[in-house]
Image: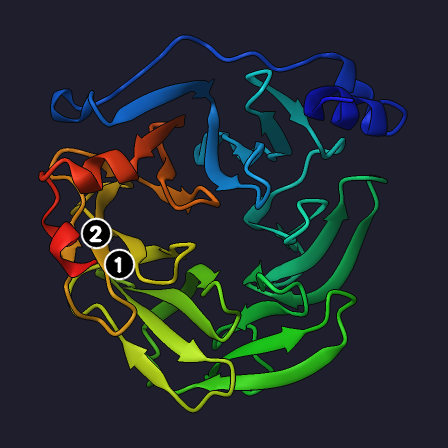
Amino acid sequence: MNNLKRWAFLFLGLVPVMISMTTCAPKADIPPDETDYVAWTGISGFEQPVWSPDGTMLALKEFKDPQAQEHTRLFLYAFDHQQTIPITGTMRDYRAISWSPDSLKLVVAKINERKYGKDIQVVDLRTGQITTIGFGEGAAWSPDGQSIAIYLGPKTNTSQGQFSIHLVRPDGILIKTIPLPIAPTPITWYDEYDGMSWAPDSQWIALSIMHWSSDNKVAGDVYVIDVNGDKFRQITTEGWNREPTWSPDGKTIAYIAMAPASIFGRVYLVRPDGSCTSLLSGALMAQSLSWSPDGNQIAYEYKNGVYILDFKKKLTSGSLPYASCR
C-alpha cells in the first residue's frame, strides 16, 4: 500500500475531512539567481515543513492569518502523490513539529489557552491517538528515538527566570533536566522558544531563543549544548537568529538570520563549533528549514509556499563559499 493510501486508510474512520484531499494552488516565488538550485513543491498555504526520516513525506502546519485568530491543523505531504492530507481532525494551534525516527509518530507543541506555554503531545500516525506527555514551549525527538527534548523558558519553567531543557522518554517520564547557562533578560524583555534540533548522534542539541522588548527590539541567538550539560556554546552573535537545523552528517547547522522588519530571513550555514559562518544565498529568503534525510536537499517555507533547495548541487557548483569548510 503506497504512502498516501496508507495514511488515508488509517485515518478514514477517524478524521471526516480525510476524504477531501487538499490540492495546492499554482504559485512559485524563486529568486532568479537560484532557479538552478530551487524547485517549488507545488505546496502553498502551509508552513514549517519537516522532512520525515524515511524521506517520503513532509509534515506541515496549515497557515492562517495570525490576525484572524483562526486555528491550524497538521498535514502530511506525500512526495509520491504530491498531495496533502490532514492528520488532525479538530482545529488546533500547533507549533514545533518533530518526527520520531521511525516516521510513525510526531511530537508537537499545542497552544494551551489556559496558561502561557504549550502542551507537548505525541501524535501516533497509525492510530490517530494524541497523547500529552509534558508542558513547555517546544520539543524535538532524538534521532536514536530514546528521548524527547522539551524546552522551558523563564515563563514556563518551575524555577522562575531560568532556561532549561527537560529530556523525557517518549512516554513523558523525565530522564534529566539540563540547565541552560543563559543570563536572564531584563524584566521588560520577553523570551520565546525559536527552534530546536538534535545532532545525528543524539549527543548534542542546537536551539534558538528569541528576546524582544516592550519597545519592539528583537534579538536571538543559536546555542549548542551536549546532553550532559557540560559543554555549552553560543554560535551566533548579532541580530535575530533562529530555527537551527542540524545536517544529517553532523557537520553543519543551518539557521535563519532574520531581516529587519520582516518575518523572513536569509539562510546561513555554520559549523557546530561556531566557525565558518557562511551565507547560503544572498537572494533566498525563508522562514523555516528542514534537511532531507540524506543531507542533499533543504526544504524551506517562503510566503506560505514550500520549496526544495538542492544543497548538494549548490555545494559542488563552486557558488557556495561554505564548500571550503566541508
The residues bearing labels 2 and 1 have C-alpha atoms spaced at a distance of 9 Å
Q: Is residue 307 left or right of residue 89?
A: left
Vertical relation: 252 (above or below) 103:
below
Residue 248: x and y, percent? 43, 54
**Label tally:** 2
Q: Which residue is mark 2?
A: 268
Q: Quadrant of residue 138?
A: bottom right
Residue at image point 80% right, 55% down: 131
Please tell me how crowded label 1 is: few (under 14), some (14-19), or many (20+) other residues with Cα within 10 Å. Answer: many
Residue at image point 46% right, 40% down: 48
> Does label 2 or label 1 sit earlier along the sequence?
1
Residue at image point 30% right, 53% down: 254
The kind of residue tagged 2 is Tyr
Vertical relation: 41 (above or below) 233:
above
Residue 120: x and y, percent? 67, 59
Residue at image point 23% right, 54% down: 269
Q: Which residue is mark 1?
A: 241
Q: Quadrant of residue 36?
A: top left
The kind of residue tagged 1 is Asn
